[in-house]
Amino acid sequence: MAKKCRVNENCIGCGLCEGTCPSVFELVDGTAQAKMEEIPEDLEAEVEDAAASCPVQAIEVE
């Protein structure tokens, strides 16, 4: 089963997630967004790194 991710309202738009995993995250109007809900298996580690690096824990991975 594919993991899913989303960026919650805690996002401060620092861009760290986009720098870590640009295939999944992008900044839109100063806030990060996930480009896709379901994470391809080959990007799971990068998304987990982005979530762990987020200074405000705005990335939720399930």
Image (tube, rainbow, N blue to C red):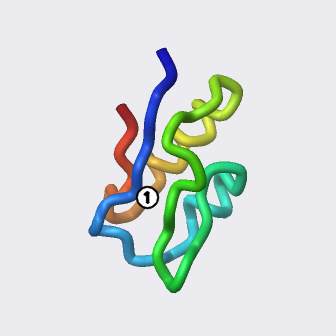
For the point 71% across and 50% down, which residue is it? Answer: 23
Q: Picture quarter containing residue 62?
A: top left
Observer-nearest of 48 and 27: 27
Q: Quick one: which residue is furthest to the bottom in this view?
A: 29
Q: Give the residue type at disc 1.
A: Cys
Residue 26 in the image: above or below residue 52: below
Residue 7, horizontal then vertical, whole percent: 39, 57
For the point 44% across and 35% down, which residue is it? Answer: 4
For the point 56% across and 59% down, which residue is it? Answer: 17
Q: Quick one: which residue is furthest to the left in this view?
A: 9
Residue 56, horizontal then vertical, whole percent: 32, 64
Residue 1, horizontal then vertical, whole percent: 47, 14
Q: Picture quarter containing residue 5?
A: top left
> Is residue 10 rendered to the left or right of residue 43?
left
Observer-nearest of 12 and 33: 33
Count of marks, rendered view: 1
Residue with the mark numbered 1: 54
Q: Quick one: which residue is furthest to the top in this view?
A: 1
> Is residue 7 rendered to the left or right of residue 9?
right
Question: For the residue carrying disc 1, how many other residues have a C-alpha within 10 Å: few (<14), some (14-19), or many (20+)?
Answer: some
Residue 7 in the image: above or below residue 27: above
Residue 45 in the image: above or below residue 54: above
Secondary structure at numbered mark 1: loop
Residue 14, horizontal then vertical, whole percent: 50, 75
